[in-house]
Amino acid sequence: MSYSEVISIVILMLGAIATFLFGMNTMTNGLEKLTSGRLEGLLEKLTGNIFTSTLVGALVTALIHSSAATTVMCVGFVNAGVMQLNQAVGIIMGANIGTTFTAQILRLGDISSDNIFVSLLTPEYFGPILAVVGIIFYLFVSGGKKKMFGQFCLGLGLLFIGITTMETAVSPLQELPGLSNLFTAFSNPVLGILVGAAITALLQSSTASVGLLQAMTTTGAITFNVAVPIIMGQNIGTCITTLASSVGASRNAKRTAFLHLTFNIIGTAVFMIGIYGGHAIMQAAGWDTSFWTAAMNRGGIANFHTVFNLVSTLLLLPFNKLLVRLVVRIIPGETQQAEFALLDKRFLNNPSVALEKARETVSQMGRIAQSNYIAACETLNHYDEHKVAELQRNEETLDKLEVALDDYLVHLTHRALSDGENQRVSEMLHSLSDYERIGDYAVNISEQAAFLHERGIHFSAAAQREMNTLTGAVGQVVDKTTRCYAALDGQLAQQVEPLEEVVDLICEDLRDRHVERLKEGTCTVELGTQFLDLLFNLERISDHCSNLAVRVIRRVSNVEDAHAYLQRLHAGDSEEFNRLFEEYKQQYYAPIECAK
């Protein structure tokens, strides 16, 4: 074989690997968008016991075709504090089973039949068919879900095309006289494990590594004793991605990554002892061991890969708690949750998960802003320096969260997002700004309370009653907004706007009354200025709550134009809005009006 032929084979092989990896990534992204993050949500929620978490880990990994992606998400969840280490162990075990699904699909290449319909199931034909179907849906069919389905089919098709191209690239190698000798060297258990681990670490995918090994079976040089240590090494090599993702994470997140590595090393050691020990016993007993040097096909590789991971999981599943204790011994010390851990950059590879964690963080901002509003209003009646100090600390946290969220969402926009996901990013950028402004206005109210306290001045009894009524109404607006945003409750969100209108009505009336008191001289200019400033701050808090509630309504009810929606409400087109407006008017405005 000439140098030009060797170079041609290498280039074709690299192109095939690139096509395979790109296809797998495209398919995973398509499925991710198609399921809107529901698969990843399973990892976080359905981990009540070790058996459930193992099944969930296997299911999610089988669908996204990447055990590394599943375990990296686990590291992120543990780092964020939404999953415990003992919950992650089952998912990691299940991920090792799920990752064998792709190899079982690729074994379809072993199908040989004169029946045209059966032949269409082989990667040689099935890949191009899927790619054509996918590109038609992706480029020419409108509709978000259909486009995502097209992306999934296109990716799966490219995956099959990649494996077929790999086989085409390596088939001339069977003519090399030294090829068998080269692979015989890999039958050395230690060398075979190292080679398998190195190739997988380089490709960053055990799925691609196993697919490459399956493609090499066409040369006839992949025998049982060669494939066994390489496949075991591939399982260890896939841990590199998880270990790399744990750099800079919390102690428990690092333990999660090492849990993955420890599980695979122990499984490999147990299997090596069993297989090589069993082979030695069979030889000593004079039994037939011809299988040891028999050539393997794609199906043989896929079956051993599945059996190895399935048996390893079944053997170690009863000892899951011991595994957790072992990694705690390996990485000792108390775990500390990272600041703003929900905004873990590991989630950026799964935009739907990253968006959900960002939304949870925005909701956290809402709870802090509500807490500050309550504290600020309390200081108006009973000034408390400790409460003001806590309010200032909360405000600093709000400012940090705003910066962190803004940075996180900007990073997220650099990923391949669907139109809906881009819209959610825009919505959250506006929402976090609204909550930050509510926090600022709460600080303003506390500063006005401090001003009144330092000068020993107070509002009149009438003005204080008016202010207490208004702060109660705004407090209810804030509470409804915080709860409806956290729960994405459209029905609760619809209650905000009529109450916000009542707040505007109260503010307008109180502003006029206070101007009259200033004219009559029953209120000083100093107190009057503070009262009017309080009205402004409370009204602005209510306005920002209205913005947040309308976004919730748009999200759950598919309202296109928020401005037109509000215009219809204020024009009296909604009976529910009118009913709630009258109800809140009687509750908050009527007592003030009667006190004239």
Image: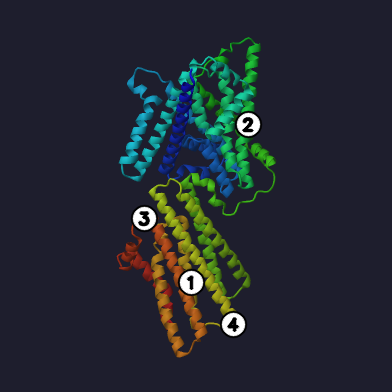
Above or below, 446 against 363 in this view is below
Is residue 384 or residue 132 the one in the foreground? 132
Q: Amino acid at mark 3?
A: Ser
Number of numbered discs on residues: 4
- Dots 2 and 3: beta carbons under 8 Å? no
Residue 459, position in %: x, y? 52, 82
Q: Earlier in the sequence, mark 2 or mark 1?
A: 2
Q: Which residue is mark 3?
A: 557
Identify the disc placed on residue 265.
2
**Label 2 sits on what residue type?**
Ile
Q: In the drawing, what numbered circle is on residue 17? A: none
- Residue corresponding to mark 4: 455
- What is the C-alpha distance between the residues marked 4 and 3? 50 Å
Foreground disc of the pair 3, 1: 3
- What residue is at 36 percent from the left and 32 percent from the top? 130
Residue 486 screen position, x and y as percent: 48, 57
Element assignment for label 2 = helix
Q: Residue at x 60, y 26 (%)?
A: 193
Circle 3 residues within 10 Å: few <14, some 14–19, many ≥20: few
| Residue drawn at the location 61% of the way across and 47% of the way down | 248
Q: Is residue 280 left or right of residue 532?
A: right
Q: Quadrant of residue 559?
A: bottom left
- Which circle, 2 or 1, is nearer the viewer? 2
In the rendering, at what x and y percent does residue 16 appear? 45, 29
Amino acid residing under circle 1:
Gly
Residue picked out by circle 1: 472
